[in-house]
Image (cartoon, grey):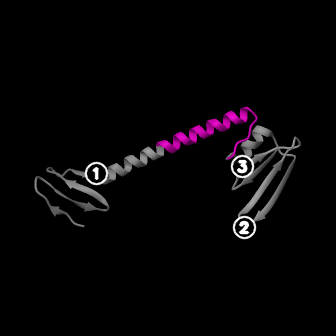
């Protein structure tokens, strides 16, 4: 869509999916773009805060010798040590791995992360 004459001192229209206002003096405001960038920044901040909280929860669990869903193999080894036995199985859903420990505990991995824990 092109620019259309509008009453007042400037012109307005849509350019590249952004609402553009051309004001006196040639200043351009990309209102739609700025709102989108602001929302993107808020989402990035929320994601970073969530990742930070997850990292802190995992580190606290490792210190307490606990395993959580979502941990990596390295994090499980830090919490419980190396497994006594590793069993792997394949299916249409991919490769599933079970780590078994002498005390009867086990950990299942799928897609490189812990999917379940049991005793």
Q: Position of residue 63 (x, y in %)?
A: 72, 32
Disc 1/disc 2 C-alpha distance (Å): 48 Å
Nearer the camera: disc 1 or disc 2: 2
Crowd around label 3: few <14 · some 14–19 · many ≥20 (10 Å): many
Q: Which residue is mark 3?
A: 114
Q: For the residue labelled by badge 1, is the local secondary structure a helix, a strand or a loop? A: helix
Nearer the camera: disc 3 or disc 1: 3
**Quarter of the figure with the C terminus:** top right
**Quarter of the figure with the N terminus:** bottom left
Q: Position of residue 70 (x, y in %)?
A: 67, 47
* Residue 80 horizontal side relative to residue 49, left or right: right
Magenta residues span 45-69
Q: Residue 12's image quarter?
A: bottom left
Q: Residue at x 52, y 45 (%)?
A: 47
Which sits earlier in the primary sequence, circle 3 or circle 1?
A: 1
Q: For the residue labelled by badge 3, is the local secondary structure a helix, a strand or a loop? A: strand
Q: Which residue is mark 2?
A: 92
């Amino acid at each position: 869509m092109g620019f259309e004459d509008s009453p007042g001192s400037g012109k307005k229209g849509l350019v590249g999916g952004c609402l553009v206002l051309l004001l006196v003096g040639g200043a351009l405001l990309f209102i739609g773009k700025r709102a989108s960038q602001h929302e993107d920044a808020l989402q990035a901040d929320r994601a970073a805060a969530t990742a930070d909280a997850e990292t802190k929860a995992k580190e606290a669990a490792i210190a307490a010798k606990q395993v959580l869903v979502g941990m990596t193999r390295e994090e499980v080894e830090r919490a419980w040590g190396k497994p006594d036995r590793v069993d792997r199985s394949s299916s249409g859903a991919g490769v599933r791995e079970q780590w078994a420990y002498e005390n009867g505990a086990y950990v299942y991995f799928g897609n490189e992360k812990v999917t379940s824990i049991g005793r």
